[in-house]
Image (spheres, rainbow, N blue to C red):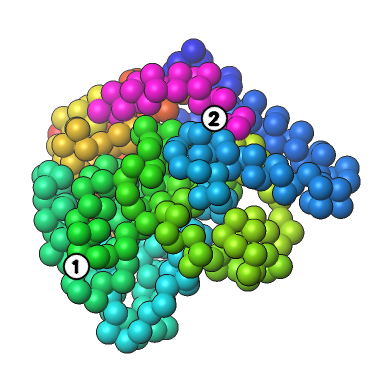
């Protein structure tokens, strides 16, 4: 079951054309039902749930993460999202004036702001490797990142799949060059689970974060952090609570009362992804996103952000239109209100961009419809 017929498996409004799975995901009904079951259990006896049920349940969910993405369960903890993980690692660093934090110009905005905040607190320098858009090749990314490193670099943060440009970065190659330079590396894989096949320890980074609530169909608020064994003792959550001093998993597993059902529903999300096809679904979505990119590029005279081999289940394209924030917001709202199309439109590197996602409930006619609307709205001809 693929295309519009697959919408029956979700709570999504069928009257809306959903082309933005990448931002917030979409949770299948089966996973929502499991989360509802967990919530009912929690509400029936909160004391027993949090005191007796939750501690082993969250560690069992970590086993699922380790089985899915590699490593040991004790290296995996849950967070609300990738941004939370980045903040925890940044706050765990010992920084001094003159130290350097490095990321790229394609980094997620919230991550960049967190790095600037941390640098400002310590007197460290924030350095951004300026990458072009579109990107020409993996070699181009590697060379520009390497150029930004220096002997005082204390952390390199790079994307696995860039949010604004939907570009798959050569994460293993970047980690290798950082390791050779003696620089710890954090890979932001917010978009990776469910979109890419993952062997997280095999990337040989120091930290890796992921959002299961995007492409893996988990409920929103199901983020993950993997930490290399050598870094476990020095990695802490940004919230200090009763688990402080108990070690990596104890500190992250309990940072206060919260609704933890999204975390405990990870297994149901993995099962849903597998039922939808697992690896075959990822291949299907990637091919659909590539076809969508070709349609939009041809019809709109738009330029994809990277070669097809460096794109996954999303395609970002630079549009031939005026680039300012008000125009982007106006176009996005117009597409939603007048045409029932949900798709990101934004300004990046002084140009107007659109980013489309491909998920099981999408089909090629969706992108043809988007292109027809944009041709008319942007007066492309």
Identify which residue, 61 or 325, lies in the foreground.
61
User: Taking 1 as reference, is 379 above or below it?
Assistant: below
Q: How many residues crowd mark 2 within 10 Å: few (<14), some (14–19), many (20+)?
A: many
Q: Is residue 94 left or right of residue 293?
A: right
Q: Residue at x 38, y 19 (%)?
A: 280
Q: Secondary structure at mark 2?
A: helix
* Residue 270 - label: 2
Q: Main secondary structure of the magenta part?
A: helix
Residue at 88% x, 42% y is 44
Q: Which residue is depicted at the point 86% across and 48% down? A: 48
* Span highlighted in magenta in the image: 267-290
Asked if residue 15 is positioned above or below residue 168 in the image, the reply reads above
N-terminal of the pair, mark 2 or mark 1, is 1
Quadrant assignment, res 63: top right
Q: Which residue is mark 1?
A: 149
Q: Position of residue 175 (x, y in %)?
A: 26, 53
Q: Is residue 21 visible?
A: no
In the displayed structure image, the side of residue 274 where residue 311 appears, left or right: left
Whole-percent x, y for residue 254 in the image? 68, 59
Image location (x, y in percent) of residue 86: 44, 61
Q: Is residue 323 above or below residue 20?
A: below
The quadrant in which the C terminus is found is top left
């Amino acid at each position: 079951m693929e295309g519009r017929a697959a919408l029956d498996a979700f709570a999504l409004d069928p009257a809306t054309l959903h082309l933005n799975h990448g931002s917030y995901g979409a949770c299948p009904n089966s996973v929502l039902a499991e989360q509802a079951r967990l919530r009912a259990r929690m509400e029936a006896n909160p004391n027993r749930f949090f005191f007796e049920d939750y501690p082993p349940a969250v560690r069992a969910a970590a086993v699922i993460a380790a089985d899915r993405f590699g490593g040991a369960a004790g290296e995996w903890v849950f967070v609300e999202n990738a941004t939370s993980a980045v903040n925890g690692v940044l706050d765990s660093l010992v920084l001094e004036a003159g130290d350097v934090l490095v990321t790229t110009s394609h980094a997620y905005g919230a991550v960049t702001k967190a790095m600037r905040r941390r640098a400002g607190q310590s007197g460290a320098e924030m350095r951004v490797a300026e990458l072009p858009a579109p990107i020409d090749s993996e070699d181009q990314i590697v060379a520009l990142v390497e150029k930004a490193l220096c002997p005082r670099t204390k952390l390199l943060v790079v994307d696995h799949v860039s949010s604004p440009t939907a570009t798959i970065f050569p994460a293993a190659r970047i980690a290798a060059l950082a390791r050779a330079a003696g620089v710890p590396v954090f890979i932001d894989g917010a978009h990776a689970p469910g979109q890419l096949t993952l062997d997280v320890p095999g990337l040989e980074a120091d930290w890796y974060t992921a959002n299961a609530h995007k492409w893996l169909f988990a409920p929103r608020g199901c983020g993950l952090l993997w930490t290399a064994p050598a870094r476990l003792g020095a990695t802490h959550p940004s919230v200090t609570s009763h688990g402080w001093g108990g070690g990596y998993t104890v500190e992250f597993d309990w940072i206060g009362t919260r609704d933890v059902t999204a975390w405990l529903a990870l297994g149901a999300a993995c099962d849903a992804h597998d039922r939808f096809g697992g690896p075959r679904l990822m291949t299907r979505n990637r091919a659909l996103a590539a076809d969508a990119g070709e349609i939009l590029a041809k019809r709109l005279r738009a330029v994809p952000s990277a070669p097809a081999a460096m794109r996954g289940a999303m395609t970002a394209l630079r549009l031939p239109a005026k680039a300012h924030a008000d125009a982007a917001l106006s176009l996005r709202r117009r597409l939603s209100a007048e045409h029932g199309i949900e798709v990101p439109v934004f300004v990046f590197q002084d140009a107007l961009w659109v980013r489309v996602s491909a998920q099981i409930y999408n089909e090629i006619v969706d992108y043809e419809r988007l292109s027809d609307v944009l041709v008319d709205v942007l007066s492309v001809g």
